Amino acid sequence: MDAQTASRPAPIPRHGPGGRPAQRTHRLVTGFFTQDELAELLYRRLARPVGRRQVEHAGRRFALHEAVRVAGRRDGGRDALGLTGRVERIEDLVLAGAELGVGSVRLAGVEYVTQRGVIAVAIGDGDEPPAPAGCAM
């Protein structure tokens, strides 16, 4: 493990009860969900929209933040920015000067392959949705 890998936060594993993957249990937990996974939860009525950018599932509310999962550099080169494997809020990337494309983001002259989705953050009734700490999940 090199110094760059050691300093990068590990992605949050999304597992439901008993270690089964979250998409198979259809249980919404705090973490990253692709657009397809979220659409399936809504289509199957396992979650329902509540207000603006929120859903309700199993009696709990979740704030939804648009985000991307960074798969790696498009050219396969070394990732000096350490974004590979991270989940970043789109708002934070734009504030950092990133340009968004379909399935990609360009930051500091480097193009990365991405997968769009949302970060679902559990919130209490009446609470304001919290921003994910450090934006890296």
Image (spheres, rainbow, N blue to C red):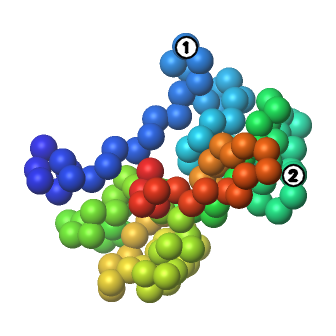
Residue type at tag 2:
Val
The structure residue drawn at horizontal position 64% and vertical position 48%, both measured from the top left corner, is 120
As measured in the structure, the alpha-carbon distance from the residue carrying label 1 to the one carrying label 2 is 29 Å
The structure residue drawn at horizontal position 59% and vertical position 41%, both measured from the top left corner, is 30
The foreground one among 71 and 56 is 56
Q: Secondary structure at mark 2?
A: loop
The foreground one among 135 and 111 is 135
The structure residue drawn at horizontal position 77% and vertical position 36%, both measured from the top left corner, is 60
106 vs 32, left or right, is: left
N-terminal of the pair, mark 1 or mark 2, is 1
The residue pinned by badge 2 equals 50
Where residue 45 appears, x then y in whole percent? 88, 37
On the question of residue 61 being in view, the answer is: yes
52 vs 34, left or right, is: right
The structure residue drawn at horizontal position 11% and vertical position 53%, both measured from the top left corner, is 3
| Mark linked to residue 18 | 1
Q: Quadrant of residue 52?
A: bottom right
Residue type at tag 1:
Gly
